[in-house]
Amino acid sequence: KVSKIAKDRTTKQVINDLMQMFCNLITEPAFIEVAFPNTLYRYQAGFRQELSYYKTDLPAWNELQTLSQMFMQAIKKSEPFTDVIGQLYDLELVGNTMGQFLTPPDVADTLASITAPLMGEITEPLTIGDMTGCGAGTLVLSQVKSILHTQGRGAVRFLDVRALDLDMNMAKMATVQIVLSACIHRIQIRSLI
């Protein structure tokens, strides 16, 4: 609906705008102090950006606000650390020049269920992640979800999560999904880079 109201905004751009809005939120000092007390944080230049398009299109901005509420509700209603937007975004990547393809959640969940038991009991800091192009964060989210299922919240609090991608929009999407899921479901992770 946002892309229909907004002039010159594709569905892909609207999803990127939504992720940008949440990146701006989660990097606000007031948010960090409440959600992650005593946390050291930093972010790369370009991670925070003004959504200047919406300054001249109030109806589109209002609809983006509605979409943001729907996104948070989808995270709340989903199992913790579930990729709730990756498949929608993947549909918008058709014909992209970077050769991007996002891992389907069922594939990511299967891989995580195979590898999680190999980690043994997690009682000290452990680094997990996707260092080869995290996309929407599907593989990382599935890893955390699998550890949560098999070992509980206590193990998740030891996780140092790493998610890297050449595409800043993908890094933002993965970050937003991990941080919002942790906050909304009140599950602590040790760190996220």
Image: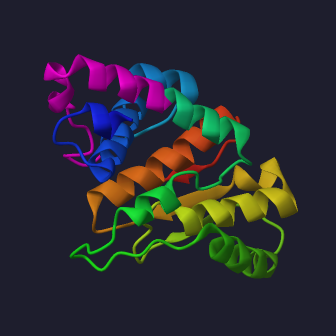
Relative to residue 90, is residue 51 drawn left or right? left
- Using the rendered view, name the quadrant where residue 171 is placed: bottom left
- Magenta-drawn stretch contains 157: no
| Relative to 118, residue 193 above or below | above
The answer to whether residue 28 of the structure is visible from this angle is no
Relative to residue 45, is residue 181 drawn left or right? right
Spot occupied by residue 99 in the image (x, y as percentages of width and height): 30, 80
Camera-side residue of 136 and 117: 136
The answer to whether residue 31 of the structure is visible from this angle is yes
Spot occupied by residue 8 in the image (x, y as percentages of width and height): 16, 42
Spot occupied by residue 44 in the image (x, y as percentages of width and height): 25, 49
Spot occupied by residue 32 in the image (x, y as percentages of width and height): 47, 28
Q: Residue at x 35, y 75 (%)?
A: 100
Q: Which residues are magenta?
A: 42-68
Task: Give the quarter of the figure containing the C terminus.
Answer: bottom left
Q: Residue at x 40, y 35 (%)?
A: 22
Relative to residue 184, is residue 25 drawn left or right? left
Q: Residue at x 30, y 40 (%)?
A: 3
Q: Residue at x 39, y 35 (%)?
A: 1
Relative to residue 24, is residue 74 drawn left or right? right
- Magenta-drawn stretch contains 58: yes
Count of residue discs = 0
Camera-side residue of 191 and 136: 136
